[in-house]
Image: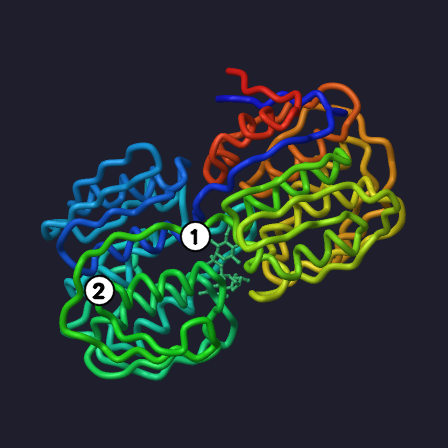
Amino acid sequence: MDKIIVRGGKKLTGTIFSSGSKNAGLPIMAASILAEGKYILRNVPDITDIQTMIKLLRIIGAEVVFNKNELTIINKGFSRYEAPYDLVKTMRASIYVLGPLLARFGKAKVSFPGGCALGARPINLHLEGLQKLGTTIEIKHGYIYAYTDKLKGGKIFFEKKSVGATANILMASVLAQGITTIENASCEPEITSLAHFLNKMGAKIKGIGTEVLTIQGVKTLHSIDTTLISDRIETATFLLSAAITNGNITIKNCSPVHLGFVLDKIKEIGFSLQISKDTISITDKGEKKPVEISTNPYPGFPTDLQPPFAALLSTIKGKSIIYENIFSDRVMYISELQRLGADIKLNGNQIIIKGGNKLTGAPLIASDIRAAAALIIAALASNGKTEISRVYHLDRGYERLEEKLAKLGADIERVKD
Ligand code: EPU
């Protein structure tokens, strides 16, 4: 197992390129199940979650080649309809194959994902939505067995917004007979990019980017090429890494338009941002102040940035509060930040930060992808050496983050345990 060692106190400066989006890439890869042919996906991040999805597509029967951020998937018709436990337990997004397998073959067997470091994470909305489209579902021996003679369009109202359920139902409904409507659909850029991808394959989805999606089922789809959108969470992770060191960096190839509230909060804290269509530069303006943040579905403030922002706010003098409204258990990193000397505590869903303590390096354990990023950000501002273990969490979602930060001047390295 690898560890990341950070010696804090170095100002980040320079230019960096954003990678393609993990959460856009995963459902698009699953969508390749929907039609035979050759798909080329560009700007795909080389991270372990993408590798896990590659393994899953190979198990189902695809030929996959991944070379220098370009992914080729050849679907010549599949022989297996299963997402096994070993893969689902390492990546919940494996559930994305459920909708496409049902749409294409009328059957699927997918391991039931359990809880994770973010809490219980139910999948009731995925299953209820598929049932509304005419699927029979049984849970046996830890697996979801799903069957249908033919998916039929239906009216689906999500009582709660869900990125994963919206993606799964979209992928199932594009080949269903008749019209499906999804109300209270997620509007995340990753969902919008999936919907555009499906339309390019020949699907008929209307309302893209809104809370009501209307899907007119079609008989067949075809394979296509695409380039993934950039990863908004990685972009913000760079901005926060620079901010905590009072640095001055430029991120190219990113999508500022996907980061509305996030950029507003960075400015409200007191950093200066120069923004163009696909570039953001951050500079330290001097005076800083604490802020209040509430996580919400897009276009609200993303829960994935709650831990990284908590790391930055630990160093900003005054009382900041973050209200975590999506994953109430996304708090395991808090006790690790306390080990660095941060004054941060939990009260219900409120993360209360009395910022401004001097942070000092310590051994830390990462508990999930964004917790790992938060610990690295905090370590960049900590005096002395911080050693972060279980960095396989980081590698699930960030493409060589330590190499990119080192290029910007951070004293950071990966070592074998
Ligand atoms: N929920 C239900 N029932 C369901 C599905 C979700 O109650 O059937 C609840 C969840 O428990 C949560 C809320 O609805 O409280 C939102 O969950 P959502 O389904 O939107 O999350 P997800 O699809 O499981 C994706 C991202 C996460 C990101 C969330 C929220 C992928 C692969 N994962 O998860 O990304 O935090 O949306 O934006 O796209 C990450 O990248 O580190 C990550 C965890």
Which residue in the structure is indicated by mark 2?
A: 102
* Mark 1: few/some/many CA within 10 Å (<14, 14-19, 20+): many
Give the residue at the far top of this rendering: 416
Q: Does any atom of ligand 1 lie closer than 8 Å to the CB of label 1? A: no
Q: Is residue 85 left or right of residue 375?
A: left
Question: Which residue is pictured at 25% across the width and 47% down the height?
Answer: 40
Q: CA distance from mark 2 to mark 1?
A: 27 Å
Q: Secondary structure at mark 2?
A: helix
Instruction: Name which of mark 2 and mark 1 comes first in the sequence.
Output: 2
- Amino acid residing under circle 1: Ile
Q: Is residue 222 left or right of residue 355?
A: left
Q: Nearer the viewer, residue 66 or 255?
A: 255
Q: Secondary structure at mark 1?
A: loop
**Picture coordinates of residue 224, whole percent (x, y):** 22, 56
Question: Which residue is pictured at 54% across the width and 41% down the height?
Answer: 369
- Amino acid residing under circle 2: Leu
Residue 281 versus residue 211 in the image, above or below: above
Question: Which residue is pictured at 75% across the width and 54% down the height?
Answer: 267
* Mark 2: few/some/many CA within 10 Å (<14, 14-19, 20+): many
Which residue in the structure is indicated by mark 1?
A: 229
Quadrant of residue 410 within the rendered picture = top right
Residue 395 versus residue 259 in the image, above or below: above
Question: Which residue is pictured at 21% across the width and 45% down the height?
Answer: 73
Q: Nearer the viewer, residue 239 or 15?
A: 15
**Picture coordinates of residue 314, whole percent (x, y):** 79, 42
Q: Is residue 48 left or right of residue 121?
A: left
Asked whether the viewer can see residue 141, the reply is no
Q: Nearer the viewer, mark 2 or mark 1?
A: 1
**Picture coordinates of residue 29, whole percent (x, y):** 30, 51
